[in-house]
Image (cartoon, rainbow, N blue to C red):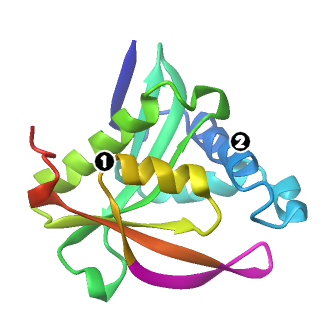
Amino acid sequence: MLTIRPMTPADDFAAVAQVYADSWKHAYQGLVPQRYLDKLRPESWIGLLKADPEANWIALLDDRVIGAAYVSYARDEARQGFGEIVSLYLLPEMIGKGYGRLLWQAAVEHCHQQGLSGVCLWVLMGNDPACRFYQRMGMQPSGRTKTEAIGGEMLPLKEYILLLEDSGASN
């Protein structure tokens, strides 16, 4: 049975961190320097998870952590009143089974319940599967781009947005 809920301090931080490490190695192959991906360890995420566990939503399949999403208020001043899905990842073997959609819906519903007017997120350019996923979820490219240092290189990202009053998130 699938359960999606906010993370708690009692949850298995190592299992959630493993989702991040495995997902990065799968999703960003060919997009992020391979030497960086090869060095990724789950421990890299544990401190971030412990800093604010409740901002992380986890997907559990029969008590096994299979996905995680980090949801916050938008970090960009241009998106005041928006929530931001900072990350949303599944274990690679869980992709394509509908779990990502359910995790995404929980993150968006959380933003809707907080009274936010929209949701934004940033996707690494070239990550076509993620772009297609977010577009199927109703998100649209905003036209905004930025670069971020990842693995010692400046990599381009593009923003997607969803206005919640148009999303049906409360249904």
The stretch of residues the image draws in magenta is: 143-155
What amino acid type should be assigned to the residue bearing mark 1?
A: Ala
Q: Quadrant of residue 45?
A: bottom right
Task: Return the residue nearer the eye: 171 or 82.
Answer: 171
Q: Quick one: quadrant of the N terminus?
A: top left
- Residue 56 x, y percent position in the rendering: 41, 48
Q: Is residue 55 above or below residue 155?
A: above
- Residue 99 x, y percent position in the rendering: 44, 29
Q: Residue at x 61, y 69 (%)?
A: 125
Q: Is residue 19 above or below residue 149?
A: above
Q: Main secondary structure of the magenta part?
A: strand
- Report which residue position mark 2 lands on: 22
Image mark for residue 107: 1
Pointer 2 local density, CA inside 10 Å: few below 14, some 14–19, many at least 20: some
Q: Residue at x 80, y 59 (%)?
A: 30
Q: Give the distance between the C-alpha atoms of the residues marked 2 and 1, in whole angstroms.
A: 21 Å
Q: Quick one: quadrant of the C terminus?
A: top left
Question: Is 153 part of what is drawn in magenta?
Answer: yes
What amino acid type should be assigned to the residue bearing mark 2?
A: Asp
Q: Is residue 43 above or below residue 151?
A: above
Question: Is 35 part of what is drawn in magenta?
Answer: no
Task: Return the residue nearer the eye: 153 or 134.
Answer: 134
Q: Quadrant of residue 149?
A: bottom right
* Image position of 59 (left or right of 142): right
Pointer 1 local density, CA inside 10 Å: few below 14, some 14–19, many at least 20: many
